[in-house]
Image: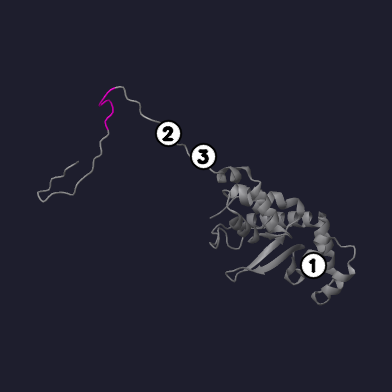
């Protein structure tokens, strides 16, 4: 199926972080063809690189990742006294990090033993991504929203941030509020004369041998 350039305006597609398997394990069938594929990909890479370079945490890590190899990352981390806490946390993921077209990714193996490449997400994009994956995806629960996020991107403290977002989501909070049960108030029947109120119990007996039904 051919998709026009309007796909690039989607918050997720614009950042070039579609999942390897969307909707919990089902492969996507949407593909881009011809120049459209190149345009969307190039625009997305430029956007991702721009946001990562402008982010203090990731930009520091990009410099370390480019200038150091995997054998001395521990030494690099120890010497990096000017690194922020966020950068140090990402450095702990050193062996999972890779650069592709100047963009930093984290590669993991999911429960289905599929390799997933996660975009290392800058701080400025967190709210945008969570809103797209939770609010725009039908207000899924915490675990499903986390699954959607992990199939696309990564940032330190992602689980806590998504959990906080869902707990403060007005629609989710309202849907989980207990609904009051309406009950008819109890009272007494007041009669003014005999037989003004009749109470009758009835039941359906089993069908007789001749096929007739009787009520009592």
Label 1: which residue? Answer: 91
For the point 63% across and 58% down, the residue is 146
Per the image, label 1 sits on a secondary structure element best described as: helix
Find residue 170 and report its image quarter: top right
Between marks 2 and 1 in the image, the one whose residue lies nearer the viewer: 2
Residue 184 in the image: above or below residue 136: above
Q: Which mark is residue 180?
A: 3
Secondary structure at badge 2 equals loop
Of labels 2 and 1, earlier in sequence is: 1
83 and 55: which one is in front? 83
Considering the image in quadrants, where does the C terminus appear? top left
- Kindly report which numbered mark, 3 or 2, lies closer to the viewer in this rendering: 2
* Spatial CA span between label 3 and label 2: 17 Å
Q: Which residue is mark 2?
A: 186
Which callout, 3 or 2, points at the residue further toward the start of the chain?
3
Q: Position of residue 199 (x, y in %)?
A: 27, 34
Magenta span: chief secondary structure: loop
Residue 151 locus on image (x, y percent) = 63, 61
């Amino acid at each position: 199926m051919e998709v026009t350039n309007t796909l690039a305006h989607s918050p997720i597609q614009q950042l070039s972080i579609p999942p390897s398997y969307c909707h919990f394990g089902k492969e996507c069938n949407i593909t881009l063809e011809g120049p459209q594929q190149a345009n969307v990909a190039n625009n997305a890479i430029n956007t991702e690189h721009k946001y990562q370079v402008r982010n203090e945490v990731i930009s520091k890590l990009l410099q370390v990742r480019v200038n150091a190899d995997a054998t001395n990352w521990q030494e690099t981390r120890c010497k990096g006294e000017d690194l922020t806490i966020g950068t140090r946390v990402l450095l702990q993921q050193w062996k999972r990090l890779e650069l592709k077209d100047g963009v930093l990714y984290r590669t993991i193996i999911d429960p289905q033993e599929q390799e997933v490449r996660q975009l290392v997400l800058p701080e400025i994009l967190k709210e945008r991504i969570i809103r797209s994956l939770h609010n725009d995806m039908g207000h899924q629960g915490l675990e499903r929203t986390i699954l959607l996020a992990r199939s696309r991107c990564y940032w330190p403290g992602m689980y806590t941030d998504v959990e906080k977002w869902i707990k403060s989501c007005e629609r989710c909070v309202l849907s989980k509020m207990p609904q009051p049960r309406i009950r008819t108030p109890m009272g007494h029947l007041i009669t003014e004369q005999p037989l003004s109120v009749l109470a009758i119990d009835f039941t359906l007996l089993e069908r007789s041998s001749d096929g007739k039904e009787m009520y009592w």
